[in-house]
Image (spheres, grey):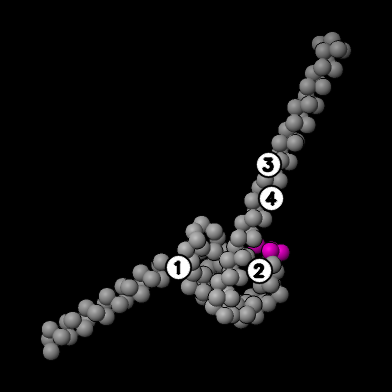
């Protein structure tokens, strides 16, 4: 390869590497931005749900077994909520994980509702059986 050909090849290679770096940076920015948006959604929904339940940050942190300082950091978007804490929060506040993570705008915990419904059906069946026998 001639010296001129080598210069062109190096120039093309440098351009390709620079373009790849820019695209990678853009994609990295997009992923970082998406993560921040998700963190904000979760923090806002946890905070709204906690306030609706009339619990303080101190009370909530105690219920999910973490310290108040860490909990405040999660609600203020300083850190991501660990998944085990989100599960405890959903259970404590009787909201769905789908709601907390922004997958639905319906905060109801459908699984809990169906469990309560099954218990209620069982109670009614026992009452009906008692009426038939007595």
Whether the magenta-drawn stretch holds residue 62 is answered as no
Residue at position x 24%, y 79% from top?
124
Compared across the picture, whether 52 is left or right of 113 comes to right
| In the depicted structure, whether residue 23 falls above or below residue 28 | above
The span shown in magenta is 77-82
Mark 1 vs mark 4, foreground winner is: 1
Q: CA distance from mark 1 to mark 3?
A: 35 Å
Q: Considering only order in the chain, which callout, 3 or 2, is on the residue closer to the N terminus?
A: 3
Compared across the picture, whether 62 is left or right of 124 comes to right
Q: Considering only order in the chain, which callout, 4 or 3, is on the residue closer to the N terminus?
A: 3
Compared across the picture, whether 7 is left or right of 19 comes to right
Q: CA distance from mark 3 to mark 4?
A: 9 Å
Q: Position of residue 6 (x, y in %)?
A: 83, 16
Find disc 2 in the rendering and name its residue: 75
- Which residue is situated farthest in the bottom direction here? 134
Whether the magenta-drawn stretch holds residue 80 is answered as yes
Which element type, helix, strand or loop, lies under badge 1? Answer: loop
What is the crowding at mark 1: few (fewer than 14 residues within 10 Å), some, or many (at least 20)?
Answer: some
Residue at position x 33%, y 73% from top?
117
Q: In the rendering, which numbered label is found on residue 27? A: 3
Q: Are marks 1 and 4 in contact (CB under 8 Å)?
A: no
Q: Considering only order in the chain, which callout, 2 or 4, is on the residue closer to the N terminus?
A: 4
| In the depicted structure, whether residue 49 falls above or below residue 7 | below
Find disc 4 in the rendering and name its residue: 32
Residue at position x 50%, y 61% from top?
105
| In the depicted structure, whether residue 19 falls above or below residue 110 | above
């Amino acid at each position: 390869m001639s010296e001129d050909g080598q210069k062109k090849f190096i120039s093309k290679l440098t351009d390709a590497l620079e373009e790849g770096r820019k695209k990678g940076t853009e994609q990295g920015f997009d992923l970082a931005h998406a993560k921040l948006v998700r963190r904000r959604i979760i923090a806002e929904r946890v905070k709204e749900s906690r306030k609706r339940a009339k619990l303080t940050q101190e009370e909530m942190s105690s219920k999910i077994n973490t310290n108040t300082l860490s909990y405040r950091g999660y609600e203020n978007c300083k850190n991501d909520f660990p998944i085990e804490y989100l599960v405890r929060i959903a259970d404590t506040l009787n909201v769905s994980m789908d709601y907390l993570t922004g997958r639905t705008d319906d905060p109801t915990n459908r699984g809990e509702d169906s469990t309560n419904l099954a218990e209620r059906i069982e109670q009614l069946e026992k009452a009906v059986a008692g009426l038939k026998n007595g």
